[in-house]
Amino acid sequence: MKKILLSTITVLALAACEDPYNRQGVGFTGIDGEPRTLSDVPGAVAFLPRATNVPAELAVLPPIRVTSGETDPQKVARVAIDNGGRSDTNSVVLTGLSTNMFLSTVSVNGTLYGVLRTENNSTRVDNQIGAAFGQNAEQFTGCLAAGDVFRKGSSQRSSGFAVPLNCS
């Protein structure tokens, strides 16, 4: 009898701590103290940076259309670089450590190019950025690279890069 009475008193005492009609639970708080929500404070355990989807942002922008009398692929690519977007109205701004790069699509004589360039021709970046752009063109543009990467600049540093795209 004492065991039943002691159990009953314990249950009633614990039940008295909460409203019996409040069915809201405490929820899962994670393992090892992991937070159950995301934080918008950089450096916090559950910080989730602002997600960007570069191909989706680029798809919203119409390609810049240019007609040129050039037929040499390198010169056509240079025309694409020269006409590539330089602002957030006609390109996607990619923020870097030292300089911002502008990603846009340019159609020269019906050939679509993905163009990655600096804001002006005097600002130059390492050519390894162009090589990485060519290797990852699909991740940046959502289209496959249909050729080599062309650059505008010297053998060490360039102000822009263009790669022909196959979006079919």
Image: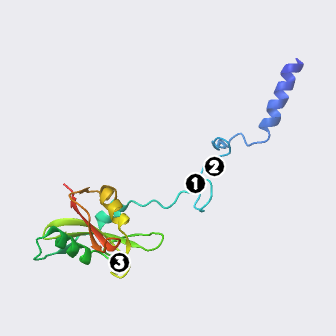
Residue 20 percent coordinates (x, y) = 71, 39
Which amino acid does the dot numbered 2 rest on? Pro
Judge depth for marks 3 and 1 and give the one in front. Answer: 3
The residue that label 1 is drawn on is 38
**Rendered position, 165 above or below 79:** above
- Going by the image, does 38 lie left or right of 128? right
Judge depth for marks 2 and 3 and give the one in front. Answer: 3
What residue sits 17% from the left and 73% below the top? 75
Q: Please identify the residue farthest to the front as the structure is shown.
A: 155
In which quadrant of the rendered view does residue 147 lie?
bottom left
In which quadrant of the rendered view does residue 72 lie?
bottom left
Residue 30 percent coordinates (x, y) = 63, 43
Label located before the other in sequence (2 or 3): 2
User: Observer-nearest residue: 10 or 45?
Assistant: 45
Disc 2 to disc 3, C-alpha distance: 39 Å
- Going by the image, does 65 lie left or right of 97? left
Which amino acid does the dot numbered 1 rest on? Leu
**Rendered position, 53 above or below 8:** below
The residue that label 2 is drawn on is 35
Which amino acid does the dot numbered 3 rest on? Ser
SS category of the residue bearing label 2: loop
The residue that label 3 is drawn on is 87
Residue 158 percent coordinates (x, y) = 33, 73
Q: Is residue 78 visible?
A: yes
